Image (cartoon, rainbow, N blue to C red):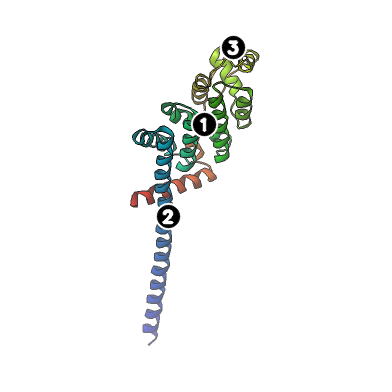
Amino acid sequence: SELNEQGSQVAQTIQEGFATAGAAVGAALTSALYKGYQRFTTIQDSTKAMTVVLGDAAQAADLLNEILGVVTGTPYNLDQFAEAGKNLVAFGAPAEKVPGYLRAIGEAAAASGGSAEAVGSVVNAFGDAVAMGKLIGDTLTRMAIQGVPALQILANQYGVTTQEIQKMVSEGQIPAIEGFDKLSEGIMNGTNGAAGATAAFAGTMEGLRSTLSGAIGGMGAAIARFGAAII
């Protein structure tokens, strides 16, 4: 009858709807598990790499856990910062200072658009100076290209003019770690002095999530954390 035919059509439509929904849920779960697996292997691989550099598995695990705390709640992925952290330690940065440096680098990179390339560029600038044991002009130039007013920050932190800080850098008077401590503090909290005020970048990474690209990055990171939790 016509009524039975209509009933059959309704039932078929419902079945097709469930099938489509099931496929969508299945695809989402598969994606989450894949991203979770990638995150899980990133943690394992990074811990192994950190262990080689530090020579201590427990210290490597603790450092990676702190780096994880830096990226959680931001649009950045763990692998970007784990690699950066490993490189900083390999360059000679003290392990206990690396999370603070990475947070400052991430905030600064986010202020200039938030790309992984920006993070890598600033890390390399940090790393080269650490390897040399002192800040050099190229370090400040490369940071400036990524939107970090490093010259002004250092001048204010040392209580001198930009001309004086340039001379100090050119003469190799600023040890790398001391300089990066002051740069990191200035990036996070802002500075004021003879070189003029510089902005505080703290919170920029989280703020980046409100942009479209940041929201997409944050969603991807959240999916990866969910998948890793399942695994």
Distance between the alpha carbons at the discs numbered 1 and 3: 24 Å
> Which image quadrant for residue 131?
top right
Identify the residue at image location x=51%, y=43%: 214
The residue lying at 41 percent from left, 78 percent from top is 9
- Determine whether 223 is above or below 123 in the image: below
List the residue tagged with mark 2: 34
Q: Which quarter of the rendering shows the N terminus? A: bottom left
Q: State the image coordinates of residue 35 (x, y, percent, origin top left).
A: 43, 52
Q: Label 3's element?
A: loop
Q: Secondary structure at mark 2?
A: helix
Left or right? Give the position of 212 relative to 21: right
Mark 1: few/some/many CA within 10 Å (<14, 14-19, 20+):
many
Q: Amino acid at mark 2?
A: Tyr
Give amino acid for label 1.
Ile
Indicate the quadrant where residue 122 lies: top right
Q: Residue at x 49, y 29 (%)?
A: 104
Amino acid found under the numbered disc labelled 3:
Val
Residue 129 appearing in the image? yes
Does residue 141 appear left or right of residue 202 in this picture?
right
